[in-house]
Image (cartoon, rainbow, N blue to C red):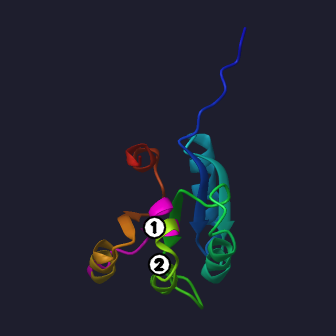
Amino acid sequence: MMIEPTITKFENVMIIDDNVIDLYIASRMITKNNFGNNVIAYTKAQEALDYLQDNQNNELALPQIIFVDIYMPIMSGFDFLKFYNELPEKLKNYCHVYVLSSTIDDYDIIRASTDVNIISFQVKPITKDFLDKIN
């Protein structure tokens, strides 16, 4: 009997969240639902930004999907996006950013939905339904 290789939707998925429990849950959802082959997880937005800058010319290392939390110490998700916006167009066309948050603050939702680099806003936690809708 041949075992079919598992096909994942994306090769690399990045998660930026200072909450290690949320990070773990999101990582498990991504791998368990064959959404991503490799999860690149960061608790600090600056480290994630450094990774993107260091690998901007290496498409194999770049994440196709980035999930970023809004409320984080030192550099918030919105601060991250401000710096992300300055990265090369080629990288921004390759990586798709989704904001994850536990906020129900209308201002944050509007701010996220008007940012050109954000595909959509998702309330935590990541669900299988949400992952299934991402192409």
As drawn, the label of residue 100 is 1
> Residue 87, relative to residue 61: is it above or below?
below
Asked whether, in this view, residue 105 is left or right of residue 76, the answer is left
Residue lying farthest to the top in this orientation: 1
Residue 17 makes an appearance in the image: yes
Q: Position of residue 96 (x, y in %)?
A: 46, 61
Residue 22 makes an appearance in the image: no
Three-letter amino acid code of the residue under disc 1: Leu
In which quadrant will I find the N terminus?
top right
Callout 2 environment at 10 Å: few (<14), some (14 to 19), or many (20+)?
many
Spatial separation of the CA atoms under disc 1 and disc 2: 7 Å
Q: Are marks 1 and 2 in contact (CB under 8 Å)?
A: yes
* Region of the chain picked out in magenta, as a range: 91-106
Callout 1 environment at 10 Å: few (<14), some (14 to 19), or many (20+)?
many
List the residue tagged with mark 2: 70
Circle 2 — which element? loop
**Is residue 77 one of those drawn in magenta?**
no
